[in-house]
Amino acid sequence: MASSRTPAIMKQGRLTPWLYLLPALIVMSIYILYPMINTIGLSLKDANSKGSAATTCIEGQPCWGILENYRYALMHEINTTSAKTTWDSFWLSSYGNQIKWLLVMVSGTVGIGLLFAVLVDRIKQEALAKSIIFMPMAISFVGAGVIWKFVYAYGSSKIQIGFLNVIITGLGGKPVTFLSEVPLNTFMLIIVGIWMWTGFCMTMLSSAIKAIPEEVIEAARIDGANETKIFFNVMVPIISPTIVVVLTTMVINVLKLFDIVYVMTGGNFSTDVIATRMYTEMYKNFQTGRGTAIAVILILIILPFIYMNVKRFMAQEEMR
Amino acid sequence: MQKGKKFVWPILSVVIVIAMLLGACAAPTVAPTQAPVVEPTKAPVVEPTKAPVVEPTKAPVVEPTKAPATVGDIVCTDVKAGDTISMLYQWSGLEEENLNKILASFVKACGVTINAESSRDQALLDTRVKGGNPPDVTFWQTTQLSQYKDQLKSLDAMGIKLDNYADFWKTMGTVDGKMMGLPVKADIKTIIWYSPKGFEAAGYKVPTTWDELDALVEKMVADGKIPWSMGTESGDATGWTSTDFVQDILLVKQGPQYVKDVISGKVPYNDVGVKDAYQIYGKWAMGDKYTVGGAKGTVSTGFNDAILKVFGPNPEAMMVKQSGFAQGTILGTYADLKYGTDFDFFGVPGAQGLQGGSDWMMAFSDKPAVKALFAFLASEAGGKAWADAGFDLTPNKAGAAAFKDPALAKRADILNNAKDFTPDIGDSIPGGFGSAEFKGITNYVNGGDLDQALKSIADAQATALKK
């Protein structure tokens, strides 16, 4: 009965949901979909985006036809003379470095962030401690890169101005070229990344920990669980959805990482990651085809993580 | 409240979408800074009578006054007062002021108006040329001479005389048998900076041959002094000072033709001559006794710091090879130092040609005003005007005596006595060769394998030069 009184204008037609979606769809297609399709198209062409990528093949050298840019993107850094050179060159290539970044930085930020989140929960100056750890997030990556460049600076003469090298030489050691010593340099750059992002992970995890009902912890204590057990068997399972979200977010962040490497070493001394290599091909070498091919590969690597992240997020929303 | 919120968001998003669409549709305004270069100086009307503009409606009775064909040394054949020349160049700020200073006498004498745009974006020039709307005149690099050979007006057709130019400039500017542009500005990299006081105190003489330089370096090492300051760190361009040094060694050991053959691809980059040059460079750049900090110092010291290590109260090295800009770096930190006594430079001894950059003036139009401008800059007056402004060096030999800055005058002297001139190898090969070269030489100095470094650069060379 009531429905018949509803004015026609307030009834939902078939098109109404689409109408609401329209703005988002338009924005998505202009700014995400179209560039993505165009990027894939460009990655199959030569440097001038005119001829097919196959025309850039050189006689007598391996060629993947229209996928030539992908061959370059994937194989160029790899020296396939023998199994050993293949592995060595891969481990120092942008892909090998990306794996180092993923392993060390993601585990570092999430691990240390979790540790801090648990620890600061128990002290009086929680807000102060948290803001100190969170502070590097407020600095731009470029700024952080410049700051850490000074921390790692190597004075070629007797005078050291780099923070670390001053300490090392002060203790009687030999100064170290942190940024050009392979493979130490990549790990030194990863430390900068950890320094910047730990605060983010800590904040996310800390709020999850705070949401754990006090009764659960109390109950565990009464049952005789010690603090370590409570942490691993009670807290971690409860906050595991948040941990997964933080993990995938960090994975995506690390895959997109560019600034730190670009500012501190410019990709020299085998510190390139996928994003810096893409930049070099695109904007320094003007090899549009190769640059976009690397971009497509990067998208393909990131996609599953975005999917996981969204799925998790939706599951979490449903629970609420 | 809930209701209100529900309505706000769709409306807001629609507004945002519309704004974005409008933004996307609006013409992508490339912002070529409309540089009001030269005041639109009106032609020097013979009689400076009262302002001719009385009423805009009344057409001027007198026909546009023809500027005198010759004013002083400046020839303005067929140029009408008020003629305009549109220009596009990369210079801005102080550089632009310098150019204005140089052109001032021409603008005044011929009564032309220059409409200039300044942009470092080569894509802008490219779009204009391809779109059939090029500027009358552009100042750009050597590569554009051949890139736009079909659109450019040749100097031969415009009747521009090149008596004031060395033959190598003519070779460089000739495409398909025609001179496509006028070299107007140059700077040289084939020079070594040192402290005359430091040399004197140690009893060293400026070397005049490569062997003397080699002997001097060994003597310095034997004396416990560090001969070179080699720092090459320069962010993502780290390595360019190294490749400059190698090119100078090539100019000494192999000569300019060899360098040109590397640029054209006739000589592969992993040729034995290049390898030889790398080894000579590597011995110095990686030796603890030859350069400040050895290999580690070379890859981690900034190129500007490297310059400063040779001068100041506690110099750490005796010499640094760097372009003309080193003078500004030295004076920027040690303002009290005097050119000629505290710091000075000499050409790389034994070099059979120079390495450096050059800017070329090119014409897309051959109207009288453009012809007159070319004739002016190619003339004695033009050379002198350029030198007088001190806008780097001028390939126009007539300017030699007009440099006010003694250091510029000395560099001009080296340039004017040069047998040949080669552009930077890395800049001359497109498509990723430059960054491959930087990376390769940096890896080599950092302890990498030389053959592998050269091979990777040679691969980039082959790919880039594949027609």
Image (cartoon, rainbow, N blue to C red):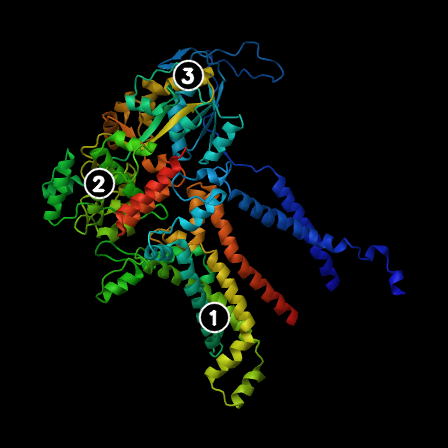
Using residue B72 as the reference point, say whether residue B49 is left or right of it. right
Mark 1 lies on residue: A130
Q: Are marks 3 and 1 on the same chain?
A: no
Using residue B47 as the reference point, say whether residue A37 is left or right of it. right
Mark 3 lies on residue: B372
The residue shown at (15%, 33%) is B209
- B202, B187: nearer the viewer: B187
Q: Position of residue B113 (x, y in %)?
A: 48, 22
**Looking at the figure, which quarter contains the N terminus of chain A?**
bottom right
Residue A93's quadrant in the figure? bottom left
Subunit bearing disc 2: B
Q: Is residue A288 above or below residue A174?
A: above
The nearer-to-camera label among 3 and 2 is 2
The residue shown at (52%, 12%) is B64
Type of amino acid under label 2: Asp
Type of amino acid under label 3: Ala
The residue shown at (72%, 54%) is A20
The residue shown at (18%, 32%) is B350
Real-space CA distance between mark 2 and mark 1, rounded to the nearest whole angstrom: 58 Å
Mark 2 lies on residue: B276
